[in-house]
Image (tube, grey):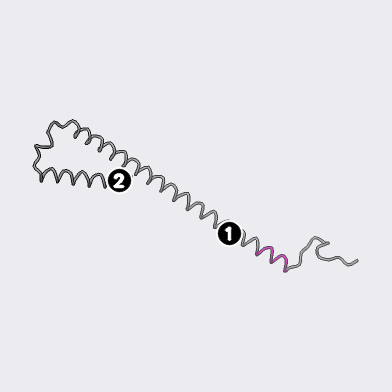
Amino acid sequence: MDQSPTETGTLPQGDLRAIESGLRSLWERAKRAGEVITELRVEKKALEAKVEQLESELLRIRQELEAREQQIASATVPAASFPDAERDILVRKAKELLVKLEAYL
């Protein structure tokens, strides 16, 4: 009775090498995927920290802007009492501040 290799439960040497090569390739890909996932998690934490920092800075700037707006609203000095040059400087500075604030938003 002649039995083929598959009937006896063994595989030819070439098939074993092919399977081993495939498994090794699969293992390397899984290992690399794990490394990439770890790198992405670290990057995500760094980005979350940066977002938190920027949100804190934005909150501080908004509070500062509100305080300045309240100071301006409560100021009793009429606009006419400023010389034109001084008024133009204040207008320019206010516009620059608004541009900076918009950049943060």
Kindly report the distance in space between the C-alpha atoms of the residues bearing marks 2 and 1: 45 Å
Q: State left or right for residue 39 relative to residue 49.
A: right
- 19 over 76 or under it: above or below: below
Please tell me how crowded label 2 is: few (under 14), some (14-19), or many (20+) other residues with Cα within 10 Å.
few
Q: Which residue is mark 1?
A: 29
Q: 96 or 28: which is nearer to us?
A: 96
Q: Amino acid at mark 1?
A: Arg
Query: Furthest residue to the front?
Result: 80
Quadrant of residue 64 within the rendered picture: top left
Q: 48 or 78: which is nearer to us?
A: 78
Tell me the element at label 1: helix
Residue 60: x %, y % from top left:
29, 39
Please tell me how crowded label 1 is: few (under 14), some (14-19), or many (20+) other residues with Cα within 10 Å.
few
Q: Which mark is residue 102?
A: 2
Tell me the element at label 2: helix
Say which residue appears at 31% left-offset and 38% top-offset: 59
User: Which range of residues does the magenta coloring cover?
Assistant: 14-21
Split into 4 quadrants, where in the image is the N terminus? bottom right
Q: Is residue 89 magenta?
A: no
